[in-house]
Image (cartoon, rainbow, N blue to C red):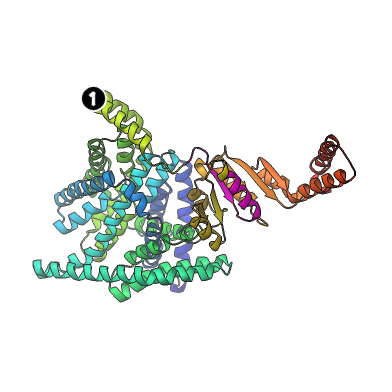
Amino acid sequence: MPHDLDLIFTLTGGLTAALALGFITQRLRLSPIIGYLLAGILVGPFTPGFVAHKAIADQFAEIGVILLMFGVGLQFHVRELLAVRKVAVPGALLQISVATALGALVGHAAGWSWAASVVFGIAISVASTVVLTRVLSDSHVLHTPAGHLAVGWLVLEDVFTVLVLVLLPGLVGGASGGGAGIAMSVGLAILKLAGLVAFTFIVGQRVIPVLLGYVARTGSRELFTLTVLVVALGVAVGSAMLFGSSMALGAFLGGLVVGQSDFSSRAASEALPMRDAFAVLFFVSVGMLLDPSQLAASWPVAAATLAVVLLGKPLAALVVVVLLRRPMKTAFAVALSLAQIGEFSFILATLGRQLGVMPDEATQVLVVASIVSITLNPLLFSARDRLARWTSAFFLRRSSAAAAAGGARGEEAAPVDELAHRTIVVGYGPVGRTLTRLLRENGIEPTVVELNLDTVKTLQAQGIRAIYGDATQREILDRAGISKADSLLFTSAGAPGDGVIEQAKGINPGLFVLARAFYLREVASLKKAGADVVVTGEAEVAFSMTERLLVRLGATAEQVERERERVRSELFDRPAEAR
């Protein structure tokens, strides 16, 4: 194979295998990540048939890591973490400590060095963001108190992983110089980290939002997407070149800066789909490391690792949540959602391999543990309520009664940002402005989705919840709370509403949709997309002009109403092609 074709063959072969196996695992109601890992095994050097170029796959995987970390920073919200800090902070720290200790014991028993064993333990202590959010969402738990606690817990795990990624090179590099060398390496790493953080937040917060705002006002989606990618990759590369830090950390900090600006939702919806494509190649590259011939020798270590992931981690989390007097159902939901490993485990393992710490056998074990735990996790999570009832009945009769009573009171008293009646208004022109005012006057606080950044800032200053972004993107609708909404009012002028309505109805089939259209010919497509009521400019003009003409001619109210019905029949009952 000619060398200059290796790149395109690796890209095409890897993505094709990932698509095929990801589709199969999705149809089997398993995580697509399993399919991506299997695709890596299929195109790897240890199986017959097509073999992808490992070095090129690793380069693609590096981009995937950068964009994954940028996405973590982008979606990191300090206020959400603070809301669950009393449970998430001690829980995450204890669970990471227990899992790391157990993993280190497994590694040491396998004959690895203590350094390799500790890194291995840290790697299996961290759950997958992709898998956890998917499982919570599929089970309709994501927006419950248990879901918020699990996500906050996972955010703390992600932050801990970022710190390990920063400190690990210094710890490993300073090991040869003894205690003083380690202290100097760690101190230097912390100084570099502080400098990078200060530079990113002082300079980045002044430059990046201004740059994104300038590009957003051009109205070009392509330029905005390109700008976000340049920010993600540029900050990552700059952190490595200027501060000697990991590119993953730089990408995380860049995501934090963008996430705290008004562009977070739009950046997530328009730019980060490319993250998913490169993240797929990251999992493919990890799968390429698996040598099936080594499984016979490493299965005892893999079995012990699975015991830590599927039993040790959940038990540690369960104990903490129960001791902090949360309901048993919440405790099992949080504990079982963490019973898996994924992308961050592989990121740590990849760094450990690059530093010469992690043996090849550890990577083999991680791949096997990831595939098995991700496969079993949805099944385990679906049993959370039964396990909670069983545990309460046999082991925690009195404690569970007190916890249930306290938990019920806690959940009722917990701050709730979701109103009993949620309405989303797409577009804030004259029509959207009028409807928003009417809703607020009737005690309903709507969420406005708008593509004009200045309008969004003005609404936020007035205390109205407003999100900047394109409502045709699922991420924007999710951010607006479409899954819990009762109604959607599409008022945007000149924008096609069928894509927005189809997306919204796909997420929330019971949603009531009131849509605006300019022309009568648009009514059929909006109705087909799922709109319950469509108001058209042409029809309203006809109604208004008919009424005014009849009033001038001296018609009675009954005559005016009768004529309005006649006009309505003429406009809406005749075939669409005749309009």
**31 and 457: which one is in front?**
457
Q: Quadrant of residue 182?
A: bottom left
75 displayed left or right of 179:
right
Where residue 301 appears, as percent x and y from the top left, is 21, 47
Residue 383 drawn above or below residue 297 = above
Neighbours of disc 1 within 10 Å: few (<14), some (14-19), many (20+): few
**251 and 217: which one is in front?**
217
Q: Which three-letter amino acid code belongs to the residue tagged 1?
A: Arg
**409 and 461: which one is in front?**
461
Q: Which residue is mark 1?
A: 398
118 displayed left or right of 80:
left
Where residue 569 appears, as percent x and y from the top left, is 82, 39
Under circle 1, the secondary element is: helix
Residue 120 drawn above or below residue 313 = below
Q: Quadrant of residue 337?
A: top left
Which quarter shows the N terminus? bottom left
Residue occupying image coordinates x 29% and y 61%: 350
Q: Looking at the image, which residue sits at the far bottom?
A: 242
**What are the residue bounds of the magenta stretch?**
419-439
Residue 223 visible in image: yes
Q: Is residue 556 shown in magenta?
A: no
Q: Is residue 432 shown in magenta?
A: yes
**119 and 315: which one is in front?**
315
Instruction: Count the numbered circles shown.
Output: 1
Residue occupying image coordinates x 39% and y 57%: 284
Where residue 105 appears, as percent x and y from the top left, is 15, 48
Residue 113 visible in image: no
453 displayed left or right of 340:
right
Where residue 5 appears, as percent x and y from the top left, is 47, 70
